[in-house]
């Protein structure tokens, strides 16, 4: 009985995170990075720049997911990708970053 109880009380969370990117290739990379960080599901919109993630909060967090996304080159609302990771993105995926003349929305 204790096995069933532990399974029933898993802490599933849904968060919405702003992630900058441009295209379908960005979408694939952002969603894959979120899942690699433990998200059960991830859906990013290139129109709103919003990523909706579902995850077990006992296993990961919104911050861990954002760190993984930043590691592949995409800035999030709380974690900025380092310049080396950003520069590895294909040219079509290199969005305007803060401080580059255009403020991120």
Image: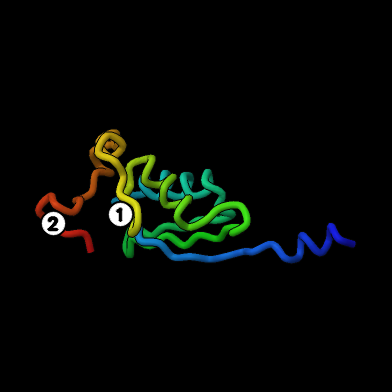
Indicate the position of residue 26 as horizontal and vertical percent values: 36, 47
Considering the numbered disc 2 on the image, is that residue within a helix, a strand or a loop? loop
Q: Nearer the viewer, residue 62 or 91?
A: 62
Q: Earlier in the sequence, mark 1 or mark 2?
A: 1
Q: Residue at x 35, y 57 (%)?
A: 78
Indicate the position of residue 96 as horizontal and vertical percent values: 19, 51
Residue 52 higher or lower than 74, as above or below: below
Q: Residue at x 28, y 44 (%)?
A: 93
The crowding category of the residue bearing disc 1, from other C-alpha atoms within 10 Å (few below 14, some 14 to 19, many at least 20), is many
Indicate the position of residue 105 as horizontal and vertical percent values: 23, 64
Considering the numbered disc 1 on the image, is that residue within a helix, a strand or a loop? loop
Q: Residue at x 40, y 50 (%)?
A: 27
> In the image, is 103 to the left or to the right of 83?
left
The numbered mark at residue 60 is none
Alpha carbons under labels 1 and 2: distance apart: 13 Å
Indicate the position of residue 15 as horizontal and vertical percent values: 48, 65
In the rendered image, which quarter is residue 17 located in?
bottom left
> Count of labels shown?
2
The crowding category of the residue bearing disc 2, from other C-alpha atoms within 10 Å (few below 14, some 14 to 19, many at least 20), is few
User: What is the image's colouring?
Assistant: rainbow
Q: Label 1, on which residue? A: 20
Q: Are marks 1 and 2 in contact (CB under 8 Å)?
A: no
User: Which residue ends up furthest to the right in the rendered image?
Assistant: 1
User: Which residue ends up furthest to the left in the rendered image?
Assistant: 101
Q: Residue at x 53, y 43 (%)?
A: 36
Q: Label 2, on which residue? A: 102
The quarter in which the N terminus is drawn is: bottom right
Residue 21 higher or lower than 105, as above or below: above
């Amino acid at each position: 009985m204790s096995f069933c109880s532990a399974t029933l009380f898993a802490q599933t969370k849904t968060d919405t995170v702003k992630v900058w990117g441009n295209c379908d290739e960005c979408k694939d990379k952002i969603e894959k990075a979120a899942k690699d960080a433990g998200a059960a599901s991830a859906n990013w919109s290139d129109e709103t720049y919003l990523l909706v993630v579902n995850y077990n909060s006992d296993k990961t967090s919104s911050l861990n997911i954002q760190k993984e996304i930043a590691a592949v080159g995409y800035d999030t609302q709380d974690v900025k990708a380092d310049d080396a990771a950003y520069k590895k993105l294909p040219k079509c995926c290199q969005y305007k970053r803060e401080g580059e003349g255009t403020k991120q929305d």
